[in-house]
Amino acid sequence: MARRLIVQKYGGSSVGNIDKIVNVAKRIASYKKKGYDIVVVVSALGDTTDELLGLASKITKAPSERELDMLISTGEQVSVALLAMAVHRLGIEAISLTGAQVGIVTDSSHTKARIIGVKARRIREELKSGKIVIVAGFQGMNVDQEITTLGRGGSDMTAVALAKVLNAEMCEIYTDVDGVYTADPRIVRDAKKLDRLSYEEMLELASLGAQILQARSVEVASKFNIPLHVRSSFSNRVGTLITKEVKAMEEVFVSGVTLNKEEAKVTVCDVPDRPGAAARIFGEIAKQNINLDMIIQNISRTGSTDVSFTVMTSDLGKTLRLMKKTVKTIGAEGVIFDKDIAKVSVVGIGMRSHSGVAAKMFKALAKRKINIEMISTSEIKISCVVRKRKGEEAVRILHKVFELSKRR
Ligand code: ADP
Ligand code: ASP
Ligand code: MG
């Protein structure tokens, strides 16, 4: 009979200090004793990645992305080595490996690389010899043997990719909360833990700011139908199971509220009202691999119009440099930006069959005098951009209006 294989990912919050690393080692050991083959993916300790990025920003505003990857990939190498030592201390065999050593091959888009293949031969050999394999999350290598990273939260991606390649029966995501909640429990005190979620809803929640899982990892889990179990590394409670949609899920029309404070609004002013101007602006952005979110263009009354869009703040410098050049080539007036925004969203699969969610959302925000600056919708979500300082209040209001604390 094939041995049971499980992939477990421990986030930075689960390995923030030595006591926590020892706690993780004990948990892994208990699964080993139950007879599982275990592949563990680990993130950098606590806030290490942010600290490393902070160091780079003290040197330059526009660091080389190759060097950034060289820098931030070091965080995970520290945590895997320490965790392996903690497991050894329990008398259990384990080996730590980098992304490159396990054959995670990516494309060359530094800082947000995509996995194009996983060789995994080394992992299989180590498992066969009875070891627990501890893999550095978040990192890979391109075909030119350059180190790459998989975007923020990318250890989730490593875990999902390994679960797929190794045909694991489960991919467990261990973190510092009990599962996925109706809103960030740090913002909404009476947020409710969700027992089950569909990939689709989780993907929207994650893309819209619920930092608990990296959006891209949910996309891949969904594509290959890999069940994800998000749970706490500090308790044995069952967390949130993320799977394909099941019928009962449709009955709930809003399952969560999210907040994203990591976006900035860029406005290209007085863009001449000519065919091709928008194509030029967005074409340049796509070429540089910058992810766009919302786009707004008003109808022109005067022969020119403002075009606004939002990007991740981490891409803002790059976007502005690019737009300064583009403004000249398309004959626009200039480019301005606003970092003082937040995006609040409500998400739910049931929105497909229930109308009136948008009206309820706008009314609730208006009642508290929270001005809506941009709106975007999809089949299962509605997002509004508001002033950043109003973001958390907006989340709490919406959580209340949609009665999410009453969810079971
Ligand atoms: P890790 O270090 O384990 O990767 P993260 O900090 O990336 O952890 O993600 C966990 C955090 O995500 C939680 O501490 C929580 O505050 C936050 N979070 C945001 N939205 C949600 C949500 N809807 N449900 C649960 N946690 C959320
Ligand atoms: N350490 C990386 C980050 O902070 C990857 C991860 O935590 O998943 O984004
Ligand atoms: Mg994370």
Image (cartoon, rainbow, N blue to C red):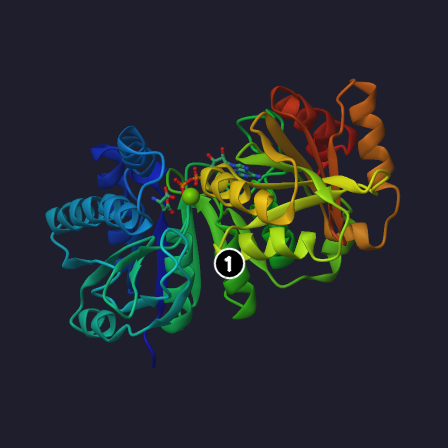
In this picture, residue 122 sits left or right of residue 263:
left
Q: How many marks?
A: 1
Q: Which residue is mark 1?
A: 287
Asked if residue 379 can be seen in this view, the reply is yes
**Crowd tier of the residue under label 1, counting other residues whose Cα lies within 10 Å: few below 14, some 14–19, many 20 or above:** few
Q: What kind of residue is marked 1?
A: Lys
Residue 243 picture quarter: bottom right
In the visual, does 299 lie left or right of 76?
Answer: right
16 vs 207, nearest the viewer: 207
In the rendered view, does 125 fall on the left or right side of 229? left
- Residue at position x 55%, y 54% from top? 284
Residue at left offset 38%, top offset 72%: 165
Q: Where does the image place residue 203, in percent across and percent down from the top left? A: 59, 53
Quarter of the image containing the C terminus? top right
The x, y position of residue 220, in whole percent, is: 50, 64
**In terms of image quadrants, where is residue 99?**
bottom left
Res 210 quadrant in image: top right
Q: Is mark 1 within 8 Å of ligand 2?
A: no
Element assignment for label 1: helix
Position of residue 373 relative to residue 34, above or below, is above
Residue drawn at (23%, 66%), measured in percent from left and top? 145
Ligand 3's image quarter is: top left
Q: Residue furthest bottom?
A: 1
Q: Looking at the picture, tell me which residue is in the foreground, 361 or 132.
A: 361
Q: Position of residue 255 (x, y in %)?
A: 69, 44
Question: How far from the left and from the top, in percent, is residue 312?
Answer: 52, 41
| Residue 258 in sight from this viewpoint | no
Which quadrant holds the N terminus?
Answer: bottom left
